[in-house]
Image (cartoon, rainbow, N blue to C red):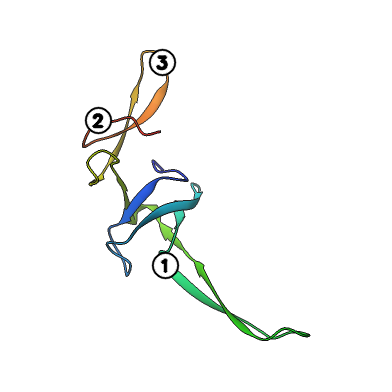
């Protein structure tokens, strides 16, 4: 999985196509991510002693293949690649502007 927590992405498939957000949590083994304000789900909590019932809204997981990274320089969606620096350190780069992703 080439995207990580904190990356800004755009959804390219599904019911939330076109929405943008930041990755809150990543599950590399499942190839799924949780994105801020995308794939909102509703859970109904039962009432308990002294507490009323309520609706709880939260972000659901989406597949990592349904999102693309947003290039910080050009503000367009881009693919992610890898390259090595002079210090033999492997870093992620954007395919559009060849800029290193922090």
Query: Residue 5 vs residue 92: left or right?
Result: right
Expressed as whole percent of the image width and height from the top left, the position of residue 42 reads 51, 76
**Which residue is pictured at 34% across the width and 51% down the height?**
9
| Vertical position of residue 79 compared to residue 48: above or below | above
- The C terminus - image quarter: top left
- Mark 3, Cα crowd under 10 Å, few <14 / some 14-19 / many 20+, is few
The numbered disc on residue 39 is 1
Mark 1: secondary structure: loop
The residues bearing labels 2 and 1 have C-alpha atoms spaced at a distance of: 30 Å
Given contact means CB atoms under 8 Å apart, are the residues at marks 2 and 3 in contact?
no
Residue assigned mark 3: 88
Tell me the mark number nearer the camera, choosing from 2 and 3: 2
Name the residue nearer the viewer: 1 or 11.
11
**Which residue is pictured at 22% across the width and 47% down the height?**
76
Given contact means CB atoms under 8 Å apart, are the residues at marks 2 and 1 in contact?
no
Expressed as whole percent of the image width and height from the top left, the position of residue 48 reads 74, 84
Expressed as whole percent of the image width and height from the top left, the position of residue 10 reads 31, 54
Q: Earlier in the sequence, mark 2 or mark 1?
A: 1
Mark 3: secondary structure: loop
**Which residue is pictured at 27% across the width and 58% down the height?**
12
Residue assigned mark 2: 98
- Mark 1, Cα crowd under 10 Å, few <14 / some 14-19 / many 20+, is some
Q: Residue furthest right?
A: 49
Query: Residue 31 vs residue 15: left or right?
Result: right
| Vertical position of residue 93 compared to residue 78: above or below | above
Occupied quadrant, residue 90? top left
Residue 5 in sight in this render: yes
The residues bearing labels 2 and 3 have C-alpha atoms spaced at a distance of: 18 Å
Q: Earlier in the sequence, mark 2 or mark 3?
A: 3
Mark 2: secondary structure: loop
Query: Residue 53 vs residue 80: left or right?
Result: right
| Vertical position of residue 95 compared to residue 37: above or below | above
């Amino acid at each position: 999985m080439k995207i990580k927590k904190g990356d800004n992405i755009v959804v390219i498939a599904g019911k939330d196509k076109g929405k943008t957000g930041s990755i809150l949590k990543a599950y590399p083994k499942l190839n799924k991510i949780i994105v801020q304000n995308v794939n909102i789900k509703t859970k109904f909590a039962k009432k308990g002693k002294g507490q009323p019932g309520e609706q709880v809204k939260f972000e659901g997981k989406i597949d990592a293949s349904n999102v693309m990274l947003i290039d910080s320089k050009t503000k367009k969606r881009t693919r992610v690649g890898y390259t090595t620096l002079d210090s033999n350190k492997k870093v992620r780069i954007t395919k559009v502007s060849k800029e290193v992703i922090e």
